[in-house]
Every structure is written in structure tokens, then in C-alpha cells.
Image (cartoon, grey):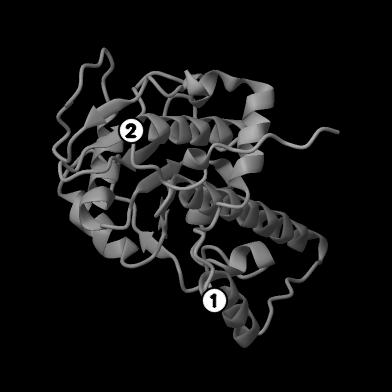
Amino acid sequence: MAPAAPLDPALQQTPADEAALRIQLAACYRLVAHFGMDDLIYNHISVRLPGPQHHFLINPYGLLFSEVNASCFVKIDLDGNTVAPSDHPVNRAGFVIHSAIHAGREDAVCVLHTHSEAATAISALEEGLLPLSQFAMRYQGHMGVHDYEGVAIDTDERRRLIDDIGPHNTLVLRNHGVLTVGRTIQEAFILMYYFEKAARVQLMAQGALAGGARLALPPEAVSDKASRQFNDHHGDILAAGSREWPAFIRLLDRIDPTYRD
């Protein structure tokens, strides 16, 4: 098997130019679709553009995640105004949720929100995500929770979204889904990927309880240790997801490279 071609450095970390960011963002949409975490034309992933204008890119309302490509994104400001020509509208709930996080968190380069089945099921459980698997332990002490207020189309909800996520990079939206924040697109994606994986494992384990199984929760000190191991980077300067990203790009390029268009 031939060695993989070197990945363009612009696809590994957050690039300074909009064109490269668009390719990264489109790749993220395609990955969410590939791993079954999308919801038809709904849900949103946004990326803040470099510069003082506080503009961000978000998906046009009406495209499946599997159809998204680098040229399709709508560029808007924090008030929801389109700041570059586009033939597409933007979902208002997407604007409200994403503008809240981009405005309230300087480190929120990428904001990713899904209604995936497992994560939404966890959001409806009073106990939320339990430290039942190593996948789940990275989120212990690093999640916010936002109570359901109806479809997120009221701008006054933005302050409560920011208050509820606090310093965390994962926000459970009760009865709705989950949201992740990244210093890079890669970080937001990998946090969503492993939240969904942790949620599926928990639901499978809880489903076995009807057959007489019992949950084996680790001691709190152990899950706390695992959480620190995931979240204290110990000098690692790479944001989470950076090491996996080249493999993801190779996967997409084999399947359908039109995300780059």
C-alpha cells in the first residue's frame, strides 16, 4: 500500500485564510453526515473568520450535510446580517445558537450542534451522560447543561446559552441535542464524535438492565483522574482532533472529494 500523501498544513490547524477554512468546514459537515450524526437539512456547524468584524460562516438552509461544499456557506455577522452575496437563507435557530457562542466566547472558533439520536436521548435523561465508558470520562466536569426553552428562535435565549456553557466546550441541550465548541474545527468535531460514541455505549448498557445486568460505575476518583488525563494536555500543543484529522481527510477524498468545491 502506497504511503498517504502529505496533508496540506492548512487542513491540520486553523488557517488564517477564508478559502482554507471553508474546505475544513465543508469536510466537517461531510464527516458528521458520514458518521450518521446529521438531521436532514437541520443542525449547523459554524466557523468564525479571522479579523475584527466578527463574521462567521454557516450552512445555507436547505442543503443536506452530504451536499455541503466549500463554496456554499453563507457569511453573516453577529446580528444575522448577510455580509457577502448569497442566494440562500440561514436557519434562524442556527443563527441564534451560533451567534450566542461566537459572541460570548473568544476561543469559540468552531461551534457544532447536532440532534443525533443517542446524544438527544442522553439529553432527555435526568442523570445525563454517566462515566460508564472511557469515552464518557473526558466530559465529566467539562459539560454544561441548558434547559429546553422551545425552538431557539428568540435572541434573549443567547445570554442563557452562554451562561450555561460557561468555560466548557460541551453543552447538553436538554430534550434537544448537544453542542460542542472548538479552538479549531477539528476539536469541535472530535468532541462531538466521542460524545455520540459515549452516548451510544451508555444507552446500550442501560438497555441491558432489563435483562438483569447491573451498571459498573468506576469510583469517582478514577473517573476524575481519567477526565484530567483527557483534558490536561501536559504540554501537548495540538488541539484535540488534530492527529485524527489527516485520516479523516483521506477518508473523504476517497469517498467524495466534492466537499472541496
Residue 125: image x %, image y %?
52, 59
Q: Is residue 77 left or right of residue 150?
A: left
Of the numbered discs 1 and 2, the one sitting upstream in the chain is 2
In this picture, is 146 found above or below 4? below
Three-letter residue code for mark 2: Glu
- Label 2 belongs to which residue? 18
Q: Judge the density around disc 2: few (<14), some (14-19), many (≥20) Cα neighbours within 10 Å.
A: some
Three-letter residue code for mark 1: His
Q: Secondary structure at mark 1?
A: loop
Task: Pick the residue in front: 156 or 55.
Answer: 55
Q: Is residue 239 left or right of residue 85?
A: right
Residue 128 visible in the snapshot: yes
The residue at the point 34 percent across, 22 percent down is: 61
- Label 1 belongs to which residue? 234
Q: Is residue 32 left or right of residue 160?
A: right
The residue at the point 60 percent across, 54 percent down is: 194
Residue farthest toward the right in the current orientation of the protein? 1
Q: Secondary structure at mark 2?
A: helix
Residue 106: image x %, image y %?
26, 57
In this picture, is 123 found above or below 89? below
Give the quarter of the image for residue 214: bottom right
Residue 253: image x %, image y %?
63, 26
Residue 124 visible in the snapshot: no
